[in-house]
Image (cartoon, grey):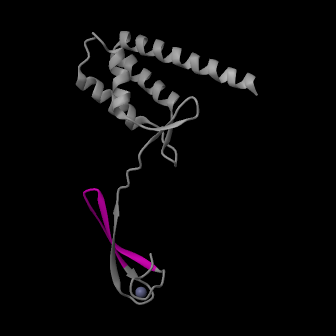
Amino acid sequence: MICPFCKVDNDKVVDSRVSGTAIRRRRECQACGRRFTTREYLEIQPLTVIKRSGEKEPFQREKLIRGIMNSCKKRPISPEDIEELATRVENALPVNDNSEVGYDTIGNLVMQELKKLDPVAYVRFASIYREFKEVGEFVDQIKTLDK
Ligand SMILES: [Zn+2]
């Protein structure tokens, strides 16, 4: 951090305090001895989903929930259960430095969670998902033949 007084980039953190989602740091310039404060805030980067086709789209929780709901029709699963499941999936997503996640990864996580929740919903989701997957692979193959 460049000192706002003498512009030298040499400071030491003398105190850190957490307040909510922010961290306040008291710094001391090692060149001129003056103190200043910085604040760090949580940066929420929007998640990007990489589709099978390689296309990217912003992650939409509603879309995830809709997909799960379709598999849970007429099953003893409450909307709260679905919300919770979606949250668990979201929290478990392995996100890389660019905040990107593969479509397959999301599908697999949903399957894992549904398996624990309701076997019928799981089978439904898996069959729809696998079908999509096969269609995607078919398209991939056609693309390869084109080359
Ligand atoms: Zn200074």
Which x, y percent locates residue 136?
58, 21
Circle count: 0
Which x, y percent locates residue 2?
45, 79
Q: Quadrant where the N terminus lies?
A: bottom left
Quadrant location, ligand no. 1: bottom left
Q: Is 99 positioned to the left or the right of 143 in the image?
A: left
Q: Is 22 positioned to the left or the right of 64 in the image?
A: left
Q: Quadrant of residue 53?
A: top right
Q: Nearer the viewer, residue 103 or 26?
A: 103
By secondary structure, the bulk of the magenta-drawn segment is best described as strand
Q: Which residues are magenta?
A: 11-27
Q: Quadrant where the C terminus lies?
A: top right
Q: Quadrant of residue 109?
A: top left
Which x, y percent locates residue 139?
63, 21
Q: Quadrant of residue 54?
A: top right
Task: Note whether 108 is above or below 46 in the view shown.
Answer: above
Which x, y percent locates residue 107?
47, 25
Q: Nearer the viewer, residue 53 or 23?
A: 53
Q: Residue at x 55, y 19 (%)?
A: 133
Q: Residue at x 27, y 9 (%)?
A: 74
Q: Is residue 44 magenta?
A: no
Q: Is residue 23 magenta?
A: yes
- Residue reaching furthest front? 146
Q: Residue at x 69, y 25 (%)?
A: 143
